[in-house]
Amino acid sequence: MPIARKLHRFLNDHHAEYELVSHPYSERAMDTAHSACVPVKNMTKAVVLHDKQGYVMAIMPSMNKLMLRWLNTKLDRHLDLATEKEINRLFPDCSQGAVPPMGMAYGINTCWDDELNSVQDLYLEAGDHRELIHLNREQFKALFHGQSHAAISCDPDEEDAYRTTL
């Protein structure tokens, strides 16, 4: 499966310019960055969350951790991690654990981390464990137009009592 059907349709419907990058099988975003020879700060990852209002996808650099308390404050929500069962139901055209960081393609509100503004090239999981979508920053921002963004992640080594991280 080179690219998830819904993701492919979404990119085509938005006339997105992207490149498909193949890499050896890997399951974690950080490992994928290494196997694809992509800088970890350019590799994105998705965290799927939910509350009584529905689902939200948070997108951030692969090396960062989500600051859930800050995201909940920003969105005025009470989000928590979605279960694996929920994720499999939401992304039926994807391999388990290979969620594309583009919630809009699946009808999921998305909030992306402002740190992604600092890189020119972004790489996103394509729905399996062997392909990435490569977008330039301008194309990424065009696709995510209208979605929330804020400083929602941090370096995992940062110590701050206020930051509840995932």
Image: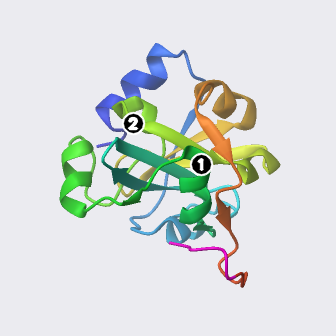
Which residue is the site of mark 2?
A: 108
> Mark 1 Cα within 10 Å, few/some/many (few <14, many 20+)?
many
In primary-sequence order, the first of circles 2 and 1 is: 2
**Residue at screen point 54% across, 15% down:** 15
Element class at badge 1:
strand
Please name whichever residue, 166 or 15, is drawn nearer the observer in this view of the structure.
Answer: 166
Residue 21 in view, yes or no: yes
Q: Note whether 28 is above or below 70 in the view shown.
A: below
* Left or right side of 126 for 51: left
Q: Residue 123 carries which label?
A: 1
User: In the image, which residues are magenta?
Assistant: 161-166
Residue 44 in view, yes or no: no
* Left or right side of 124 for 63: right
Element class at badge 2:
loop
Is residue 163 inside the magenta stretch? yes
**Residue at screen point 35% across, 33% down:** 106
Number of callouts: 2
**Residue kind at label 2, given as amino acid type:** Ile
**Residue at screen point 36% across, 44% down:** 55
- Counting from the top left corner in percent of width and height, residue 56 is at 43, 45
The single residue placed furthest to the right in the displayed view is 118
Please name whichever residue, 106 or 162, is drawn nearer the observer in this view of the structure.
Answer: 162
